[in-house]
Image (spheres, rainbow, N blue to C red):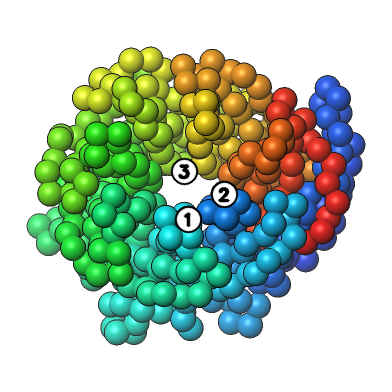
C-alpha cells in the first residue's frame, strides 16, 4: 500500500468522531439494544478482514491496523475466549505497509495469513513501496514461524489462503504485469502453492487473456481438486473496465492440472461499474455454491447465490437484498450444511447495518437479522456458533467520514438472529 495523506487524515478523523457513535434501542421487531457490542481498538485505525473459531475452541480476529506513529499498516491477529476477553493480540510486518486479507486456522493449531507487503520482497529492494503478495505462519500463541513474499515488478497480493492435504498451502489473489504491446497493466488471477514451511513449489495464472481478473475465494473440493472463485472484468473494452463477472476455475491440488475456466454472464451476474467485485465459494459433495456482490446500473447492491455442479454447470440461483441494498463479507457452513452470510445492508436512509442471513443448502431463507447503531456503519465480517448463540465479528466506523474502520468488535445473536446482551469485557 502506497501511503495516501488524505486517507491517513480521514482515518484520524474517523477514530475521533466514532466516539460519538451511540448505543440505542433497536426498533426492529423485538430486537434488544446494541449495547452488548465489545469493542477492540488501536489508535491509528483498524480493519477486520477475518473472524472465526480457533482450533482450541476460542475466537480469533485478523486484519490490519494503522500504527498511530507513522500510519504504516501492520497485519494483526487477536485471540479471545468465547466471551470476547482478550487472551493475546499481536502485530506482524516491518517498517512499511503490511496487511492481512485472510487469516485462517491451521491443522497444527496455528494460523496462516495472506495479504500484501511493501516491507519485504521486491518493493523494499527497489525502494519504490510497491507491494508483493505476502504469506505468514504463526504457532498457536501467535509467534511467527515463517513468512515469505511472492510477486513480479508491480502490485501483487493474496486475497485468500487454504491449507492443502499435504499441509502445504495454496494462496491466491492477483499478480500485475505490464503488457508492453499496449502499455496496460494486466491484473491476472493467480495462485501459488507452497510447502509446509512457506517455500515456493508452483504457481498458476488463470484467465490470462483478460485485462483484469482476481481470485477472492479458494476452496478444496471433496474430490481433491481446488477451486478458485474469480472476479473477471466483463471485457477488455474501456467501457467495461469497472464491470465484473463471477468466474470459476478448477485445478489439481498441486495447481499443475487444469479443468477449464468458466465465466458466468447470465442472470445479470455481471456488475455495472461495480466497486464491490467480490466473489467467494463453498464446496459440497455434489458441487459448489458461489456468492457474488452485484451492483446494478441503478445503483442497487445485492448478493447473488448460485449452485453449480462439479463441472461448473449452474443448477439454481437466488438473489438477496437485505433492507434494500446488501453486500457480503464472508460465508460459512454449519454442521448441517446451512450457510451463514455475513456483511452489511443499507436502508432507505443510506445507513449501513451489520447483516446476517442464514439459508439452507438450497438457498431458502431460514432467518435474517440486521444490526444498526445510530451514528455508525457496521459490517459483519464473520460468524461462529457458540452453544445456541452465534458470535459475530464486526467492523464499526462513523458513517460520514473516511474508509477505514476505527474499531472492530464482537456481538452475540441467538439462533433466531436476535441480538443478545453481553457484558463488554475486552
Measuring from the top left, give residue 364's x and y in whole percent: 54, 15
- Give the residue at x 41% y 38%: 280
* Vertical order, 146 against 318 (above or below): below
Q: Residues within 10 Å of mark 1 (few under 14, many from 20)?
A: many
Q: Quadrant of residue 233?
A: top left
- In the picture, measured across the screen, residue 321 lies left or right of residue 279, that is right
Disc 3 marks which residue?
Answer: 275
- Spot the residue most to the right: 25
Measuring from the top left, give residue 347's x and y in whole percent: 70, 30
Disc 1 marks which residue?
Answer: 105
* Secondary structure type for disc 1: strand
Given residues 191 and 43, the one toward you in this image is 191
CB of mark 2 within 8 Å of CB of mark 1?
yes
* Secondary structure type for disc 2: strand
* Vertical order, 423 against 219 (above or below): below
Q: Quadrant of the N terminus?
A: bottom left
Disc 2 marks which residue?
Answer: 52
Measuring from the top left, give residue 177's x and y in whole percent: 21, 61
Query: Mark 3 or mark 2, which has the lower sequence index?
Result: 2
- In the picture, measured across the screen, residue 79 lies left or right of residue 132, that is right
Query: Mark 3 or mark 1, which has the lower sequence index?
Result: 1
* Vertical order, 133 against 326 (above or below): below
Query: Mark 2 or mark 1, which has the lower sequence index?
Result: 2
Amino acid at each position: 500500500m502506497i501511503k495516501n495523506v488524505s486517507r491517513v487524515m480521514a482515518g484520524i478523523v474517523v477514530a475521533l468522531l466514532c466516539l460519538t457513535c451511540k448505543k440505542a434501542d433497536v426498533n426492529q421487531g423485538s430486537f434488544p439494544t446494541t449495547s452488548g457490542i465489545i469493542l477492540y481498538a488501536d489508535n491509528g485505525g483498524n480493519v477486520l478482514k477475518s473472524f472465526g473459531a480457533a482450533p482450541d475452541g476460542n475466537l480469533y480476529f485478523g486484519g490490519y491496523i494503522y500504527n498511530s506513529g507513522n500510519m504504516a499498516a501492520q497485519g494483526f491477529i487477536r485471540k479471545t475466549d468465547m466471551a470476547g476477553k482478550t487472551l493475546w493480540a499481536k502485530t506482524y510486518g516491518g517498517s512499511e505497509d503490511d496487511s492481512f486479507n485472510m487469516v485462517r486456522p491451521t491443522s497444527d493449531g496455528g494460523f496462516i495469513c495472506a495479504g500484501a507487503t511493501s516491507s519485504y520482497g521486491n518493493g523494499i529492494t527497489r525502494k519504490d513501496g510497491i507491494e508483493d503478495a505476502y504469506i505468514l505462519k504463526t504457532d498457536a500463541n501467535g509467534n511467527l514461524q515463517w513468512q515469505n513474499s511472492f510477486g513480479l515488478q508491480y502490485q501483487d497480493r493474496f486475497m485468500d489462503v487454504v491449507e492443502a492435504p499435504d499441509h502445504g498451502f495454496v494462496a491466491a489473489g492477483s499478480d500485475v504485469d505490464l503488457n508492453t504491446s499496449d502499455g496496460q497493466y494486466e491484473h491476472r488471477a493467480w495462485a501459488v502453492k507452497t510447502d509446509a514451511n512457506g517455500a515456493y513449489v508452483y504457481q498458476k495464472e488463470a484467465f490470462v487473456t483478460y485485462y483484469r481478473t482476481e481470485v477472492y475465494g479458494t476452496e478444496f473440493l471433496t474430490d481433491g481438486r481446488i477451486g478458485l472463485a474469480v472476479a473477471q472484468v466483463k471485457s477488455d473494452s474501456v467501457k467495461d473496465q469497472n464491470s465484473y463477472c463471477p468466474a470459476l476455475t478448477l485445478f489439481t491440488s498441486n495447481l499443475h492440472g487444469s479443468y477449464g475456466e468458466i465465466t458466468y454472464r447470465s442472470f445479470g451476474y455481471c456488475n455495472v461499474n461495480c466497486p464491490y467485485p467480490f466473489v467467494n465459494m463453498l464446496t459440497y459433495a455434489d458441487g459448489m455454491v458461489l456468492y457474488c456482490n452485484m451492483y446494478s446500473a441503478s445503483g442497487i447492491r445485492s448478493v447473488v447465490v448460485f449452485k453449480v455442479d462439479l463441472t461448473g454447470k449452474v443448477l439454481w440461483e437466488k438473489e438477496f437484498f437485505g433492507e434494500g441494498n446488501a453486500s457480503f463479507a464472508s460465508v460459512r457452513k454449519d454442521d448441517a450444511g446451512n450457510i451463514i452470510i455475513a456483511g452489511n445492508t443499507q436502508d432507505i436512509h443510506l445507513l449501513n447495518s451489520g447483516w446476517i442471513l442464514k439459508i439452507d443448502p438450497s438457498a431458502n431463507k431460514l432467518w435474517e437479522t440486521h444490526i444498526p447503531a445510530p451514528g455508525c456503519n457496521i459490517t459483519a465480517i464473520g460468524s461462529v456458533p457458540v452453544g445456541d448463540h452465534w458470535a459475530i465479528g464486526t467492523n464499526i466506523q462513523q458513517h460520514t467520514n473516511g474508509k477505514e474502520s476505527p474499531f472492530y468488535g464482537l456481538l452475540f445473536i441467538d439462533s433466531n438472529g436476535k441480538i443478545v446482551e453481553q457484558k463488554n469485557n475486552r
